[in-house]
Amino acid sequence: MASLTVPASAARGLADSVALRFVVRRLARFAVSLWVLLTAAFGMIHLIPGDPVRAALGISAPPSLVAARRQALGLDLPLYEQYWHYLRGVFTGDLGSSMTSQLPVSQTIANRLPATLQLALAAFVLAIVLAIPLGTLMGVLTRGGRARRTELAFTTTSVLLGAIPDFLVGVVLVWLVGVQLHWLPVAGKAGFASFVLPVISLAIGPAAILARILRVEMIAVLQADYVRTARAKRLPALAIYLRHALPNALTSTITLGGLLLSTMVAGTVLVENVFAWPGLGATIASSILSKDYPVVQGVVLVYGIGVLAVNLLVDVALALLDPRSTIRES
Amino acid sequence: MSFLPRPAQRPRASARWLAVLRTPVGFCASLGLLVVLAFAVIAPILWTGKASATDVPDLLQGPSAQHWAGTDNLGRDIVFRVLVATGLSVELALLATAITVVAGLILGTAGVLFGRRVARLMAAAVNIAVAFPGILLALFFAVIFGIGAKGALLAIGFAGAPAFARLAQTLVAGIESRDFVAAARIAGVGRLRLLVRHILPNVAEPLIVNAAIGAGGALLAFASLSFLGIGVQAPSYDWGQLLGAGLAGIYEQPVAALAPGIAVIVAGLAFNLFGEALAKGIGLTTTLGRIPLGRMRRQPAEPASEKDGDVPVLDAADVVVTLPGPGRPIRPVRGVSLRIERGEAVGVVGESGSGKSLTALAVTRLIEEPGQVTASRLRFLGNDLLAGPARLHRRLLGTKLAMVFQDPMTSLNPTRRIGRQLAEVARRHEGLSRADALAKAVDRLRAVRVPAAARRARQYPHEFSGGMRQRAMIGMGLMSTPALIVADEPTTALDVTVQRQVLDLLETIRRADSVALLLISHDVAVVGQVCDRVLVMYAGRIVEDLPAAELATAARHPYTRALAAAVPDMRTDLDAPLAVIPGRAPDPAAFPPGCAFAPRCPLATEQCRIDEPPLETDARGRRVACWHADSPTDGSTEMTTAGRGHE
């Protein structure tokens, strides 16, 4: 968090308080969102029509078992007490235990989360590594109506790739690389090779969208007055593109990139199911199907916190990149 | 992705919706969508039987005449199953979209119905919800509503609502501040009526477009949930369900997984592209179109006139700028020749569109492709700028030529500290170390009278006032020792009091180091005060070149005289209407033949409308392009008063 004050720390007084106000406001928003998320995760079980325990155990389960399970889950307590227990549990790392395996939910999450995180991070890095050079290059090449054919080819390809959902890319890759070519493993997580296909499935759509946005932004920024100023300073082309234009083009790209990163986090749910990846995505799908509500609750919470954290990071990155965003944001 | 309306006059609604069909993308997308919808209706009626008929001897067969794409693990025809699944897939997607639209509209317009407090509460709630990706929201709701098609329908419908509500809120907020809504409020129109009759019709188009795109999203979301086993349950089947079942047997029968996948992609694209084409067709996206800039070409060379002793700072002849126009190329600068001596201050005046700024960019080699510049001579401090590529002249131009642009608010890079933006010049062209360059930047900021320069150098442009930014721009030009400052409307964007300061600063710099100045301005008074000599531009040409002192008294071109007469001074009768030149400046895309000023000129004769007058130099070095130079304009009174009605 300390780094957040860097852009304004040099300019004391007013600027400092602007940065400070930004930090406070942003953290407050994070806290409110987190509270809403916790409440929603808690409320989820109570919003299910009928008795969730009965639904989970099936109609043939004896009433005594249902009652015992209700008690074990604390569902027989008054609602406010359950809420209090839930919040206290979350902050002490106790997320209850699975209704099917009886294992603590926190343990399941601890076992499964690393695989999902690795997948999401690798995909995000790949998307950025592909999109930023490609989008910048395309922006420079096609600015002011130049290279129309390149532009058309790029736009068409990126629109198509961006429109295909990640898990369908996964299915196609499974068929092409796994079934037809036998090049790479298509299921499970074992070593580097097993990462290739899921990561590509997750990254390719966001990379295409990001590159397209960055191209448009670059073209707009390259027409800005301050780029003309940089050219009037007779800087070399590369310095103009990379130092003067790119940071300005990145601000809205990062905003959208943040959105894409959170969809990528969510995209793991489906891609993991395509590739039998031993992460949280496989867990959430199977636990929804088996009506294992404590697990669902825990995993939803983890995904939700992941999304909130990503959004917070994006805002911080924006503040560092473009100091004006600390003022705009209100 | 959401589209906001552009506040502009647009043609009639029906015409615009029809125009969508005429674009290639719009046509293909509409056709694709039509095909998808047709299959959704027809396929379940015609082929439900065939799709569920099991053919036991033909399990997992490859493509054959009987089964085009082969059969699944129960011997059912894959093509028919995928086609029949169109019905349920599209139906569920459309229903989910309907739920999204209704729920989103309720959330998004609650503020109009229930007042400001509710609006803020809703905005806050939507803000939080919208941060979560749709698929997570859908999973969350799926837990509540239960597994199966109905649960998934509600889940996907509600999951899309926050994003739609956000759009509705933004659109409504934009309309709510308009006058006609305020007027309706004052007239006592009820809240519900206000919403339904006055607000919704004005935001309907973007909402419909986003609903079309949203339907594509809902289709994909349904495929996702059914694929996970949470949506449609066997024996019913939609594309997602077929996909999930097919993936399990992808080694035995890949087509069973690929075919529904392709169907999802095609249908999703059809909805998406249709929405995007609609958005484009009704003008919800803005495409930026500004002057693209280009390469330098030399016209047949002309012998340079100067001798070694008195090398002018800038010597340009026959500068022509060509830009790509909407139909054919336009030529906003048509053969400008100018020469600036050391320490001389030359002003360029003219109305907007006269080509004065483009001339400045052309002679300083700042016009980029596809814009083109030709000239028979272009020399800066004796160096031929037409010879060789631009990078050869980078150091010369970077150190000896300073540019000050019109709008200091946009001419400095918002993401870089002021000090670094200045220091860059010295780092790049003089090879100074980072610390030395920064020290020099602080020194230059001090020289242009930026108070607390060391602290200011660490600030960003948005922390500077307009006048301060313009001084920083000038300071940037002073990082080296310029021989020429080109200032393009340097004071237009500034307050009157700050204007004076900036002009005084330019004047001081000029006097101290005998720096030449090319000052471009539409403000005749400013140019008259600051400059030694004035070039008057009209329709891409210089029409007069005269000493600044003679501007008000001895101008020879009727246009110059009209410009000078239009400047109010202390003797101006405050009760009389302000003097204006009648008519308007010609469009660079269609300059009139003959003298371009003829249509507005009180002296114009037949000759003026046919023959273009050449720029003639007189004995004292003054230049003028007019067939009737020096003729008295009797019509000057008529010109100055009649103008009002015209503009």
Image: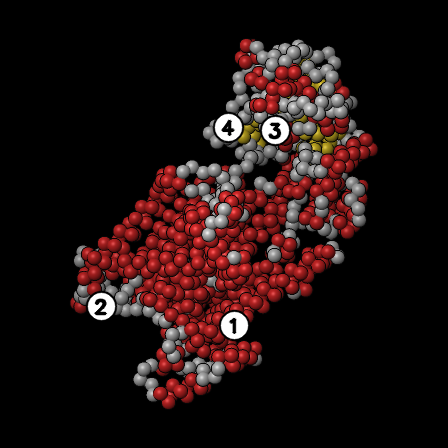
Position of residue B518 relative to residue A172, above or below, is above
Task: Assess disc 4: are there few (<14), some (14-19) or many (≥20) residues with their C-alpha within 10 Å of its C-alpha.
Answer: few
Q: Could you tell me how far apart the alpha carbons at marks 1 and 4 are, in whole angstroms?
A: 62 Å
Q: Which residue is mark 3?
A: B352
Work out whether residue B549 can be spotted. Answer: yes
Give me the residue at 40% from left, 56% from top.
Answer: B101
Subunit that carries the residue with mark 1? A
**Which element type, helix, strand or loop, lies under badge 3?**
loop
Subunit that carries the residue with mark 4? B
User: Can you tell which mark lies on residue B74?
Assistant: 2
In this image, B360 relative to B128: left or right?
right
Q: Could you tell me how far apart the alpha carbons at marks 3 and 4 are, in whole angstroms?
A: 19 Å
Position of residue B538 relative to residue A4, above or below, is above
Q: Which residue is mark 1?
A: A38
User: Can you tell which mark lies on residue B329?
Assistant: 4
Residue at mark 1 shares a chain with residue at mark 2: no
The image quadrant of residue B344 is top right
Tell me the kind of residue under disc 4: Pro
